[in-house]
Amino acid sequence: MQPLLTIQGPETVLFWFLAPLAVAAALGMLLVKKAVHSALLLAWVMITLAIFYIAQDAVFLGVVQVIVYTGAVMMLFLFILMLVGVDSSDSLTETIAGLRPIAITAAVGLGGLLVSLLGRATLGREPIGLEIANNAGNVQGLAELL
């Protein structure tokens, strides 16, 4: 069986440098106590995702990711958080008893489903390069689809 992705070079170095930072920021987003810090970490994850898009020759998606999601949606979210004034002394007690084990079970089940679906979709398939898809250009290909 051939490996699904055989890219060597700067993309690989960029991925192995930024991917742990993106995962750490995503975990930090879930684990920090202040909502503003969580929103800033989410913005970092979105910018890292845009860098990944640009590194894979999807420049249009990378620019849209930065402008629309990081630029507009995240700044609106931060504005709302600062306007409302989220306090760190909010209650952290469970309002519905027994909800945490149900949520953990559902998360593990959905994660297993995601892994099995991704494995079924990717294992044993031939890798297809981006040269064929981007012959006429990324934006032109999107325009033809629309």
Image (cartoon, rainbow, N blue to C red):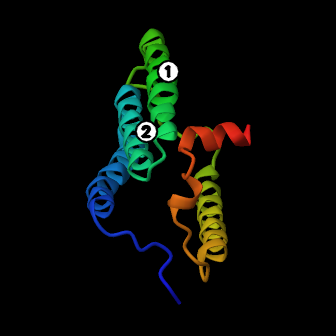
Badge 1: residue crowd in 10 Å (few <14, some 14–19, many ≥20): few
Query: Circle 2 — which element?
Result: helix
**Identity, as a three-letter code, of the amino acid under mark 2:** Met
- Residue at x-position 53% and y-position 90%: 1
Q: Quadrant of the C terminus?
A: top right
* x then y, percent, for residue 56: 43, 53
- Determine whether, in the image, residue 142 is placed left or right of residue 10: right
- Residue at x-position 57% and y-position 60%: 132
Q: Nearer the viewer, residue 82 or 145?
A: 145
Query: Which residue matches tag 2?
Result: 46
Relative to 27, residue 104 above or below: below
- Residue at x-position 58% and y-position 78%: 126
Going from N to C along the chain, the mark reached first, 1 or 2, is 2
Query: Circle 1 — which element?
Result: helix
* x then y, percent, for residue 53: 45, 47
Which numbered disc covers residue 38? none
- Residue at x-position 41% and y-position 30%: 39
**Extreme residue toward the top, this view:** 83
**Identity, as a three-letter code, of the amino acid under mark 1:** Ala
Q: CA distance from mark 1 to mark 2?
A: 12 Å
Instruction: Examine the image and state in which quarter residue 115 appears.
Output: bottom right
- Determine whether, in the image, residue 120 is placed left or right of residue 84: right
Relative to 67, residue 92 above or below: below
Query: Which residue matches tag 1?
Result: 72
